[in-house]
């Protein structure tokens, strides 16, 4: 083998080694960066699976999912609590005082705050 052929042979093996290392690194990063979850979010398959799961659970007798734990409980198995009662209204200092303050009539400096005169509300069916 000539000297030039040996150099090309060495470069070939170095290239194969670097390619294999890049392939292994890409596989590690694929799972480390949670790319399957990103693909599921972008395609909508994750939302479709969750929707189908919630639909199946509601059809099967009212089961409840705890957020971030995906544990399923029967409503009948949950402990019953006390009846919900309205909270008492807090007492404010002085007679006739209110918990709200009209900033336009307040004597305090607003220091960087600005009172808006108009508010524009925009409604759209586009999901961002």
Image (cartoon, rainbow, N blue to C red):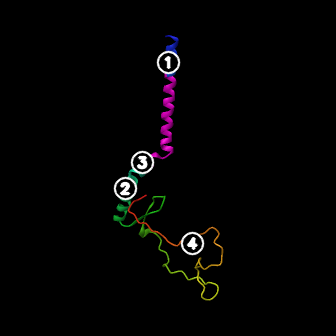
Residue 101: image location, x then y, percent: 59, 79
Classify residue 105 as left or right of residue 6. Answer: right
Dots 2, 1 in contact, CB < 8 A? no
The picture places residue 85, in percent across and down from the top left corner, at: 50, 80
Q: Quadrant of residue 77?
A: bottom left
The image quarter containing residue 72 is bottom left
Disc on the earlier residue, 3 or 2: 3
Q: Of helix, strand and loop, which one carries label 4?
A: loop
111 drawn magenta: no
Q: Look at 50% across and 41% down and name the residue there.
A: 29
The answer to whether mark 4 and mark 1 are in CB contact below 8 A is no
Q: Foreground mark, 3 or 4?
A: 4
Name the residue beneath numbered marker 2.
48
Of label 4 and label 1, which has the lower sequence position?
1
Mark 2 or mark 1: which comes first in sequence? Answer: 1
Which residue is drawn at the image coordinates 40% and 53% (left, top)? 46
User: Does 19 appear in magenta?
Assistant: yes
Q: Disc 3 designates what residue?
A: 39
Sequence-wise, the earlier of marks 2 and 4 is 2
Question: Which callout, 2 or 4, points to the residue nearer the camera?
Answer: 4
Q: Residues within 10 Å of mark 1 (few under 14, many from 20)?
A: few
Identify which residue, 86 or 7, lies in the foreground.
7
Lateral position of residue 25 relative to residue 74, left or right: right
Label 2 close to label 4 by CB (< 8 Å): no
Of circles 4 and 1, which is in front?
4
Q: Residue furthest left?
A: 59
Mark 2 element type = helix
Span colored in magenta: 12-39
């Amino acid at each position: 083998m000539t000297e030039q052929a040996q150099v090309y042979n060495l470069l070939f093996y170095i290239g194969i080694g670097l390619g294999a290392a890049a392939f292994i690194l890409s596989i590690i990063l694929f799972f480390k960066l949670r790319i399957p979850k990103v693909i599921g979010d972008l395609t909508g398959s994750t939302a479709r699976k969750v929707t189908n799961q919630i639909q199946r659970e509601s059809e099967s007798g009212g089961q409840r999912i705890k957020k971030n734990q995906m544990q399923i409980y029967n409503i009948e198995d949950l402990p019953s609590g006390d009846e919900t009662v309205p909270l008492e209204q807090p007492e404010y200092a002085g007679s006739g005082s209110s918990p709200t303050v009209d900033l336009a009539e307040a004597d305090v400096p607003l220091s960087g705050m600005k009172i808006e005169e108009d508010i524009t509300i925009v409604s759209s069916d586009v999901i961002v």
